[in-house]
Image: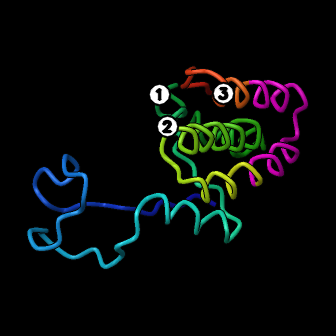
Amino acid sequence: GISQISGASRTTVGGYTEQERPRDTEQFDVSDQRTLDEVVRWLMEMGFIPSFCTACYREGRTGDRFMALCKNGQIQNCCHPNALMTLTEFLQDYASDETKEVGYKMIERELEKIPNEKVKAIAKQNIEDIKNSNRRDFRF
């Protein structure tokens, strides 16, 4: 399924420019005070793949074009590897060591579930490139 949650959201004016989350100037309370790192790790520990992917939007795969991918099952060869690649970027650039450990184990397991062998091989190579270089923004 498709879902969206908000992790580490800030509701103060200029809230994202501050290193620490302000507690007394927020426009409204979002209740969940966890950091994005904590939310991402929690999702992975529950078996979900946190995805930071915007590839379909950026590639113009919206509306009917997106639904065509869903209906014929090819979404598994786009969304799944894209989610794993964007998760790798997050882990490399922002995650704590604990979150990295959980995440890389999940990515290793999930790569094997990609049905198209060519897509799987490209995704594996892209993930290695993300880990070992400054290259980013791979997408199917």
Amino acid beneath label 1:
Arg
Q: Return the mark for residue 54.
A: 2
Residue at the spot 36% in from the left edge and 75% down from the top edge: 32
Q: Return the mark for residue 86.
A: none
Amino acid beneath label 2:
Thr
Range covered by the magenta-colored residues: 106-125
Image position, residue 91 (x, y; %): 58, 45
Q: Secondary structure at mark 1?
A: helix
Tag 3 residue: 140
Residue at the spot 52% in from the left edge and 50% down from the top edge: 95
Image position, residue 101 (x, y; %): 69, 54
Looking at this view, is 75 or 132 the one in front? 132
Image position, residue 131 (x, y; %): 66, 31
In terms of image quadrants, where is residue 66?
A: top right
Q: Secondary structure at mark 2?
A: loop
Q: Secondary structure at mark 3?
A: loop
Amino acid beneath label 3:
Phe
Image position, residue 41 (x, y; %): 58, 63
How packed mark 1 is, by other alpha carbons closer than 10 Å (few <14, some 14-19, many 20 or more), is: few
How packed mark 3 is, by other alpha carbons closer than 10 Å (few <14, some 14-19, many 20 or more), is: some
The numbered mark, 3 or 1, whose residue comes first in the sequence reads 1
The CA distance from mark 3 to mark 1 is 11 Å
The CA distance from mark 2 to mark 3 is 11 Å
Q: How many marks?
A: 3
Q: Residue furthest bottom?
A: 31
Majority secondary structure of magenta residues: helix
The CA distance from mark 2 to mark 1 is 6 Å
Tag 1 residue: 58
Decide: marks 2, 1 in contact (CB < 8 A)? yes
